[in-house]
Amino acid sequence: MTAMTDRLVPAPQPADTPPRETDDTVRRRRRHRARPKGTRLQRWSAYLMLGVASLFSLGPFLWVGLASLKLPIDAFSLPPVWSFTPTIEAYRILWYDRGFGSFLANTLLVGALTTVISLVVAAPAAYALSRFKHVSGLWILLLALVFRALPRMAVVLPFYYLARITGLYDTRILLVVVLVAVNQPFTIWLLRDFFASLPEELEESAMVDGCTRIGAFRRVILPVAGPGLVTAAVFTFLLAYQEYMIPLVLTQTDAVTLPVFIAQFSTENIQDWPVISAAAVSLALPIVGLVLLAQRFLVAGLTAGSTKG
Amino acid sequence: MKRREFLLLAGPAVVVMTLLMIAPLVTTAVLSLNRFSYGSDLSWVGLSNYTQLLSSPELHSSLFFTLAFVFGTTALKVVLGFGLALLLNFAVRTRSFFLGTLLVPLVVPPVVGALIFGWMFRADIGIGLYQYVLTSIGVDVDWFSSTSGAILLLVMQNVWQDISFAALIFLAGLQTLPAEPLEAARVDGASWWQRQRYVVVPALSGLFAFVAMMSVMDSFRVFDSIAVTTRGGPNGSTESLMFLAYKISFQQSQLGQGSAMSMLTVLGIVVLLIPFLIRTRRQFTEAA
C-alpha cells in the first residue's frame, strides 16, 4: 500500500545525487534487477529455445489450418504443397452440409449447463470444506481426489445401462447430469483453494454483526470470490467441452458433441480431409480465443491446488 | 464452523457425489459379477469375469502398455516441464506470449489434438508434414505399424498436449521462491547446475509430487488419443486399460466383463494414488 502511494506521488529527487535508500527505492531496484537476467547471449538462446517450443506447440494447428484452406487434391499430395489457391469450400461443406453449427450449439449448451449446475452445487461445499476442520471434511476431500482420478468407464457403464432402460439415452439432460457428476469433484478442489485463501475474519466480522453463516457466505464471501468463481467456471466448461468418452458412450445422434462429431469422420475418405481440418480449426479457434482473453484465470486455475493441496 | 452449517452447505454436493458417483460405482461392481449385454438379462456368474480377465494375455499386455505410458509421459513432462519453466522464468518480458502459445494444445480437446498430431506423422499423404521432414533427413520410423513407434507417438502426443500444465505449475513455484537462498548459494560459488540441484529442486519438491500426481491420474486413464490415432494397434500393443474396457464393453458387447475391467482399472488408480492420498491427508491434518 505504501509503495503504491509512493509511486503515485513521487518524492522530488535531484537528478545527480544518489537517491535515498528508502524501503521503496530498495524494492524498486530489486524489481529492476529482476527484469533482464543473464547476458545477451543467454537471453537470446533462451528466446530461441522458447521459440522452438512455441513452434512445436502450434505447428500441427498451423499446418492443419493451412490444410483446411486447400482443395482435397492439394491436401493429399506428397510432397506437401506450399503454394495453392486458398478456398473456403471445406468450411462451406462443414457448416452447411454437415451441420457443424448445431453440434457446436449443442456442445456450448451442454457445457454451459454443466458449468452453472456444478458451480451452484460445488461453491457452498468448497467453502464449507475450506472452513470445517473435522475429519469428515478430510474424507470428502480424499474422495473427491479419487473421483477426480476415476476412470470414466467405471461410472459411465451403469449410466449407459440405466439410460437404455429408461429411454434417457442420447439426451442432453443425461449428458449434463453425468458431466456434472464427473467434473464436480474437480470444481470443489479448485474452489476450496480459493476460499481457503480468503481470511476468516471476513465472514467473522459479518457474523459478529448478526449475520448467519449462510448469510455471511452469500453476502460477504461470494461477492469477493468473483475471480475464483470465474476460474472455476472456465475450467468446468473446458472439461465439459473437451470430454470425449462420456458423449461417445451416452449419445448417438441427438446430443452428440463436437469431439465425438470430429472423431467419427472417416479419415480414410480423402474428400473429407480438408473438412475435418476445417472442423478442427473451427473447434479450436473459440477456445484459443478464450486462452488469450482469460489467460489470467486459466493460469490461476491451473496452478490452484498445487501451492496448498 | 458448526456441524449443522457444514451439512447445509456441503449437503447438496455430498448428495450429488453419493447418487452420481458412489451409486454408479457400486452398480458397476455388482454388474461386474454378471454376464450380460445390452438388452439381455443379467445372469450371475460370480467372480468368473475377473478370473477370465486376470488370466487373459490381453490384460497383461494392456497393463504393460499403460504402465509404460504412465511412466514415460510423467517422466518427460516433469523433466521437460521444469526446463520450460526455467526458460519462462528467465524470459520475463516475453513470458505471457510464449505461455499463451504453449497453452493452446492444452485447451484443445485431446481427441482433436491427437487426431491432428497423428496426421503430422502419416507417411502416405501430404498432410504428414513431420513425417515428410523426418524421412527427408533420413529418420524413418514406422509410427503406426511398429509397436515401439506407436507407443512413442502416443507418448509424444501426450507430452505435446499437456506439457504446459507442468511448466505452469513449476513457473508459479519458481516465482514464489525466496531470492536469499539462491543468492547465498551463488556467493558460496555454487554453479548454475548446483543451484538448481541443491536449492531449487528441493524447494519445489511438493510441486514435483503434484505434477507427477496429475500426470499419473490422467495418463492412467488414457483413451481419447488412442481411439483416434493407433486404435489400439498394431496387434493390440497400444490398448490402454480404459481402451480395453471400452472395447470389451461396446465392441464385444460384454458389459459384464467390461464392468469387471473397469473395476480393475479403478483398483489400479487407487493403488497408484495411495502415496498422494497420504500426502494430502498429512497436509490437511497439519493445516487443521
Image (spheres, rainbow, N blue to C red):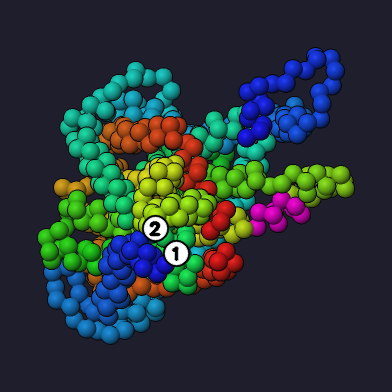
The amino acid type of the residue labelled 2 equals Arg
On the image, the x and y values in percent for residue B55 come to 39, 79
* Circle 2 Cα neighbour tier, 10 Å, few/some/many (<14 / 14–19 / ≥20): some
Q: For residue A15, what is the image quadrant?
A: top right
Residue at position x 80%, y 44% in the image:
B183
**A262, A199: nearer the viewer:** A199
Q: Which residues are magenta?
A: B197-205
Name the side, left or right, on which B193 lies relative to A247: right
Q: For residue B242, what is the image quadrant?
A: bottom left
Name the side, left or right, on which A185 lies relative to A255: right
On the image, the x and y values in percent for residue B172 come to 59, 45
Residues under numbered marks 2 and 1 in contact, where contact means CB atoms less than 8 Å apart: yes
SS of the residue under disc 2:
helix
On the image, the x and y values in percent for residue A170 come to 17, 54
**A165, B43: nearer the viewer:** A165
The amino acid type of the residue labelled 1 equals Met
A297 versus A193 height, above or below: above
What mark, if any, has residue A88 been given in the picture? none
Q: Label 2 to label 1, Cα distance in Å?
A: 8 Å
Q: Pointer 2: what residue?
A: A213
Asked if residue A34 lies in the magenta stretch, the reply is no
Residue at position x 44%, y 64% in the image:
B1
Q: For residue A81, what is the image quadrant?
A: top left
Residue at mark 2: chain: A
Residue at mark 1: chain: B
B79 versus B36 height, above or below: above
What mark, if any, has residue B1 been given in the picture? 1
**A100, A10: nearer the viewer:** A10
